[in-house]
Amino acid sequence: QSVLTQPPSVSGAPGQRVTISCSGSGSNIGAGFDVHWYQQFPGTAPKLIIFVHNYRPSGVPDRFSGSKSGSSASLAITGLQAEDEADYYCQSYDSSLSSWVFGGGTKLTVL
Amino acid sequence: EVQLVQSGAEVKKSGESLNISCKTSGFRFTSYYIAWVRQLPGKGLEWMGIIFPGDSDTRYSPAFQGQITISADKAITTAYLQWKSLKASDSGIYYCARSDGSTYDYFDPWGQGTLVTVSS
């Protein structure tokens, strides 16, 4: 059971917009800790795609964006492409656990 | 270029010890933290612990405290993850990643991962 809750899967057709939610609590996202997002393709290491809620590292397309509200955060992907099919993880810090924490991950399928 | 290069895949038996490494380059090793993250087969990411090579300050996830040891060698800019007695349930992929250590921080970049297989 992950501290941050994500839907196990989402899907969308090419060109569409999808969102992936990340629900936390008052000891992590709700306490003001930053939320970051990672993309992971099968057999490869995770890659940072959004940091501090909505900043993109160099090279990440602007089709990816993040937001945060209260104890939750979201990753949005617009203009969905086949190459976006991957697993996505949110990450924050939890003060009750004194630990960095990840969401359980969401598998994005491009139909 | 910042790089984290991990040691190769390991096949061990239950009860054996293991030390895997994360060789870093391209940044000041003693100014950043190195974290270790576990991924069990078909599962998500779990933060295990983190070390600041500058003073060896180390923090562990409660889930892994007492089960692992994280260390670093400043002379060769390498971090390590160690088990004294492996269990079959330790089988998975282990990643190292750089962080500035702040509770607000993220992990970037990541090593390529080390696959650990433990037979019972």
Image (cartoon, coloured by chain):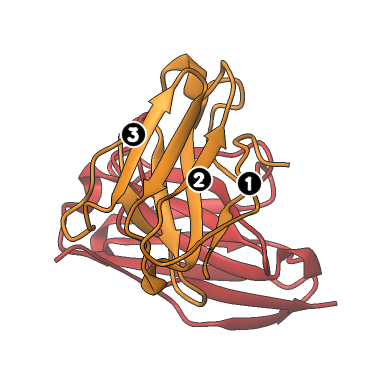
- Residue A37 point in image, percent of width and height: 40, 46
Residue ID for mark 1:
A7
Tell me if residue A39 comes above or below residue B12 in the rendering: above
Callout 2 amino acid? Ile
Residue ID for mark 2:
A20
Q: Is residue A31 left or right of residue B33?
A: right
Q: Are marks 1 and 2 in contact (CB under 8 Å)?
A: yes
Residue ID for mark 3:
A53
Callout 1 amino acid? Pro
Q: Are marks 1 and 3 on the same chain?
A: yes
What shade has chain A been given?
orange
Q: For residue B26, say whether it is visible.
A: yes
Counting other residues with Cα less than 10 Å from the Cα at mark 3, is it few (<14), some (14-19), or many (20 or more)? many
- Residue A56 point in image, percent of width and height: 23, 47
What shade has chain B been given?
red
Q: Nearer the viewer, residue B14 or A57?
A: A57
Counting other residues with Cα less than 10 Å from the Cα at mark 2, is it few (<14), some (14-19), or many (20 or more)? many
Counting other residues with Cα less than 10 Å from the Cα at mark 1, is it few (<14), some (14-19), or many (20 or more)? some
* Residue found at x 52% / y 45%: B49
- Residue B80 point in image, percent of width and height: 46, 61
Tell me if residue A86 comes above or below residue A24 in the rendering: below
